[in-house]
Image: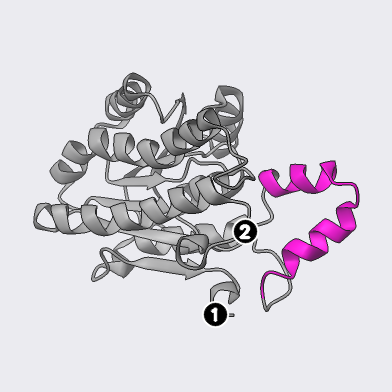
Amino acid sequence: MTEFGDDVAVVTGAGSGIGRATAGLLHSRGARVVVADINGSSARDVAAELGGGSLAVEVDVSDGRSVKSMIDSAVEAFGRIDVLCNNAGFGMRGTVVTLQEAEWDRLMAVNVKGVFLCSKFAMPHLISSGRGRIVNTSSYTSSVGIADRAAYVASKGAISALTRAMALDHVADGVRVNAVAPGTVDSPYFAAMIAAADNPSALRDELASRSPMHRMGEPAEIAEAIAWLASTRSSFATGSLLVVDGGTSAW
């Protein structure tokens, strides 16, 4: 498939999980892809797998200078930016009582400030494209909440709200802004959590039981949703939150 033609897509958090699957899918459908991740080695590995038409960039999305350098590198390499997938992020356990202030600040800096900074520096290029699209990775928890994840849930709620705000701010510029809200996905984050558990099998079953489908999602399934929002097939969608959670939020 070549539905993305010669579009240039920047994907953050592309070194693993959903970001990696998204970078691969967009590339397979014709896009030139900037594989951006805080882990430069992982970004380079993914870009090497993709081959021509890809560029690995090490980036800390919470740092404005690092983000600007990423955007400058993308434009220098490919001449334009048409798609931005704000996927970088992480989660942690904790309530407002148990979380440390530094933990809260770091999570917000990556999950929320990262979306702001990447969008800020990419926006002029997305406007120049004439067909700019942003897809943010939120979470089903932005709508329903989950216990012992106060900072993570708050950050994803902020991403969903920011998506709607940016959509209205830039609709006249021809830039569409949407978000995908995954459920629990079988990603390296949860794989590490399961491996470290006292009873890995029980934890895997617990995570799978969050969904009425009784399984975790796959990164490729979320990548398909992101690709749809990033494509012209979703041309009438902006400010939307596409929930892909196996029915979890319907419970």
Residue 35 visible (yes or no):
no
Return the mark for residue 250: 1
Is the residue 15 above or below the residue 83 in the image? Answer: above
Q: Secondary structure at mark 2?
A: loop
Distance (Cα) linking label 2 and label 1: 17 Å
The residue under label 1 is which amino acid type?
Ala
Q: Secondary structure at mark 1?
A: helix
Q: Counting other residues with Cα less than 10 Å from the Cα at mark 2, is it few (<14), some (14-19), or many (20 or more)?
A: few
Residue drawn where x is 57% and y is 69% of the image:
245
Magenta-highlighted stretch: main secondary structure? helix
Residue 90 coordinates in the image, percent (x, y)? 56, 41
Q: Are marks 2 and 1 in contact (CB under 8 Å)?
A: no
Q: What's the colour scheme?
A: one colour
Instruction: Pick the residue in front: 170 or 109.
Output: 109
| Callout 2 amino acid | Ala
Q: Position of residue 66 (x, y in %)?
A: 37, 21
x, y (%) of residue 210?
A: 68, 69
Q: Is residue 53 left or right of residue 117?
A: right
**Residue 73 sits above or below residue 6 on the image:** above
Q: Earlier in the sequence, mark 2 or mark 1?
A: 2
Give me the disc on residue 147: 2
Q: Nearer the viewer, residue 247 or 22?
A: 247
Q: Quadrant of the C terminus?
A: bottom right
Span shown in magenta = 189-211
Rendering quarter of residue 161: bottom left
Q: Does the magenta run of residues contain 203?
A: yes
Residue 77: where, in percent of width, then height? 33, 26
Q: Residue at x 64, y 57 (%)?
A: 185
